[in-house]
Structure formats: structure tokens, C-alpha cells
Image (cartoon, rainbow, N blue to C red):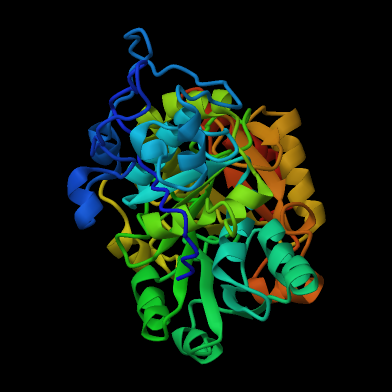
Amino acid sequence: MADTLNQNTKIVVSNKKRSSSSDECDHHDDSFFVSKKQSKSLVWEDPAAALANARHEFGEHGGVNMSIEASATFTVMEPETMRRMFAGELGPDRDFFIYSRHFNPTVLNLGRLMAALEGTEAAYCTASGMSAISSVMLQLCSSGGHVVASQTLYGGTHALLTHFLPRACNITTSFVDVRDLEMVKEAIVEGRTNVLYFESVSNPTLTVANIPELSRIAHEKGVTVVVDNTFAPMVLSPVRLGADVVVHSISKYISGAADIIAGAVCGPASLVNSMMDLHQGSLMLLGPTMNPKVAFELAERLPHLGLRMKEHCKRALEYASRMTKLGLKVIYPGLEDHPDHALIKSMANKDYGYGGILCVDMETEERANRLMNVLQNFTQFGFMAVSLGYYETLMSCSGSSTSSELNNEEKELAGISPGLVRMSIGYNGSLEQKWSQLDKALSKMQEKMPF
């Protein structure tokens, strides 16, 4: 794993504020890590319990919510301190901050919560999910580097690996079917491949990755495993299952309100520190900095993520089951006939379900568009919009929207049908109220065009 840290800066945050009389303070070993126990040896626990056990940051004047540190730059009490900060001798572990592109207390607190959620040593939050993904890839790969990735990925990630990184950085990618473990093993070239990259649950086809086996294959050849867990927070814990790094688009389930763009990198402290290195850190030098006001908002939403995910997942399973009985071609990992049902059941955290997204294959884009039009404009079941994790149901025809970066051959390899409708199931209204809207729309569709 890339480790370019040469500044001795640690991503840790003290409980103790600096004395106003001196810049010299005792080191307080209450770190940015998930817990003191986990900072030595990572121990998995239920994601909701881990969040509850993370350090609660109080406000400056004793408020139950943390304060927002909106400053771009930070002062010091003594001139010598600034030199020591830039030399890496003093840092956030002792409550010393230089500039918010480097470290910001409010953003670091959100990072602490994200590390707790994913069971990693450290995490750092960014301005978008794509900035988190691209920063990780640029930190782990150098010019001439090689990536093995799933052929079924979010369109933006696919474009990054297919077009941008080869052109701008001479980093190439071999795309594979991650369900074919032999294919993955053959694609990884020991000594050349840097990263094995895949989504825990693929966008949009809902293929479930065998994280333990894929991690084993990669680690046998010295390759770092990076998993995008955007579709399955709480449901799956990739690091517990063997992965090294987890990335998120926090804009989705973790935000839950479709009002924020944000991302996160969760992984070993050595990696996150290296990404913040003053000379070679991808996060530090490219600067996809999260606004501390955004970090505050997100930190307030994480405590009820577990409750929201359970309701998303409960409704997705119920609707998928009912639509299947009506004769629709439904794709959902929670259904027993899904090819990866047994796999996700073996990996999933107890009581969180199988994800809040389902797909309906209408075969053609015309039929897909008709269905979405009826669902939005006649029965008010949901909205035609990209993204996911909102409290209302969001629908999109993936092939012509979020996967449009793929050409026709790539879509076929990825298993993306022209009529694949992705539904991010919301929890607004009662379950039966929303089902009646969905059922009414399906009945209207069947009048003119039987399934």
C-alpha cells in the first residue's frame, strides 16, 4: 500500500484544548481512531453500536452538538510553533491546525464517525464521492500503474478508469466479472497491479461481490482492495470482510436528504495520513476539501442512519416480493432467486436487510420510460431523478442516465438492459399507501402492455 508520509503528522484529535498561555501541551491519546481498542487491533462491532461508541464531540460552550469550526486558517501563540507545524512536529493530534484544506476540526470529527461506521482506523471526508475515489486511486497508483476493476461500476467511476486515468496519469485498468474469481486471479499481475476495485453491491445491476474471496485473491498477490460501499452502508462492512479501503458517496444514504454532495475515504491511518502529506498527498495537493458546515450537517444525520437503512431495506424487500408475484422481472439481492442471495446473506450485518435499491427490467427504454412516467405523473409513487438514499423513491433508466458513460458493448458486458429501471426505495408515507400507488401504476401499464 502506498505510504508516502514523511511529515510525522497523525490524524488524531485531542479532547484537550490548547492552553492560551502556551503552544506546548501534553499529548492526549484520545485519537481520531474508532476507539483505543481498535487503534491497536481492529475489532468489528455492529455499525450502529460503533457509531454510538465513537467519541461525542460537544460544542465549545457545552452544547450537546459540536461547534462548527468555520475558519480557513488558524492562529498560533508563539512564532516557533508555525515552523514546527509545517515540519510535522505538531498537528491535529495535539489540537494544532494550520489551514482547513489540510485539517479542520469539524471535518475530522465527521471522519471519526465514518471510521466508526466502517470499522477502520481512520477516515477523511471530501467534497464528493468521485473526489474520494479519484484521490484514493491516485495515491495507490503511480504512472505505469495497473488496476483490476469490476466491469459493472457507476458510470463516473468507469469513465475515470477507462478514459481519464490512462490519458492523464498512464494508469490502466483491466475490467473483469468479479463473480468469476478465476478471471480476477488471472487479471491481477503480481508486482504490477496496485488495486483491485469493485462495488460491494454493483450499480445498477445489484451484483453482490464476494468480498472475502476477492480480498484473499488480491492479498495473495500484494494488491490493495478498495470497495465502494455507497449502496450498502450498515448492510455490509467490507473491512470486516477483508477489504483494505472503503469509499463512499456520502451524498446518498448517509446524507439521506439529496441536499449535499460529499464523499469519504475510510482505511488504515497510514494511507489516510499519506493522502494528507504536504509533498505527495493526493487529498492535500488536489484539495477536494469538505466545507465544515457540510461536515456538521452530516455528523448530525449519521446517528439515525441505521434506522433509515432498515426502513429502506424493509420496503425494498416487500415491494420486490410483491412485484415478482405480479410477473415483473425484478432484481433484488433479498429475493431468494437472486443469484447472490446466499452470498449477501452470509456477509450482511444482522437485521439491516439487503439494501434499499431494486431494479425492474422492462426490456426496452420505451417501456421503462412509460413505467416511470406513470409512477411519477399519475400515481405519485416517486420521482424521476438520479441518485439514491432519499426519503422519497427515486427512479432512473440506468442505461440512458447514470451508466450512459458506458458504450453499448460495455453495457452488455455489465448486464445493463436498455429497459433497466433502478429504484431507490424511499420511506415517506406508509408502506401500504406507497404500494397502492405502485400497484395502481402497474395495473395501468398492464392494460396496454402486459408484462
Q: Quadrant of the N terminus?
A: bottom left
Residue positioned 30% across, 36% down in the render:
51
Give left or right: position of 155 versus 291. right
Question: Looking at the image, is 111 positioned above or below residue 1?
Answer: above
Q: Nearer the viewer, residue 209 or 376?
A: 209
The residue at the far left in this view is 37
Give left or right: position of 143 versus 392. right
Give left or right: position of 122 versus 351. right
Question: Looking at the image, is 30 positioned above or below residue 180?
Answer: above
- Residue 44 visible, this angle: no
Q: Nearer the viewer, residue 269 or 204?
A: 269
User: Count of labels shown?
Assistant: 0
Residue 223, x across and y down, in percent: 45, 78
Q: Nearer the viewer, residue 390 or 28?
A: 28
Q: Residue 112: which quarter of the image?
A: top left
Residue 217, x across and y down, in percent: 39, 82
Residue 236, x across and y down, in percent: 37, 54
Q: Quadrant of the C terminus?
A: bottom right
Residue positioned 23% across, 35% down in the render:
53
Q: Residue 241: which quarter of the image?
A: bottom left
Residue positioned 55% across, 27% down in the render:
292
Question: Looking at the image, is 312 positioned above or below residue 344?
Answer: above
Residue positioned 71% across, 57% down in the render:
156
- Residue 408 visible, this angle: yes
Residue 336, x across and y down, in percent: 38, 62
Question: Looking at the image, is 186 positioned above or below residue 74?
Answer: below
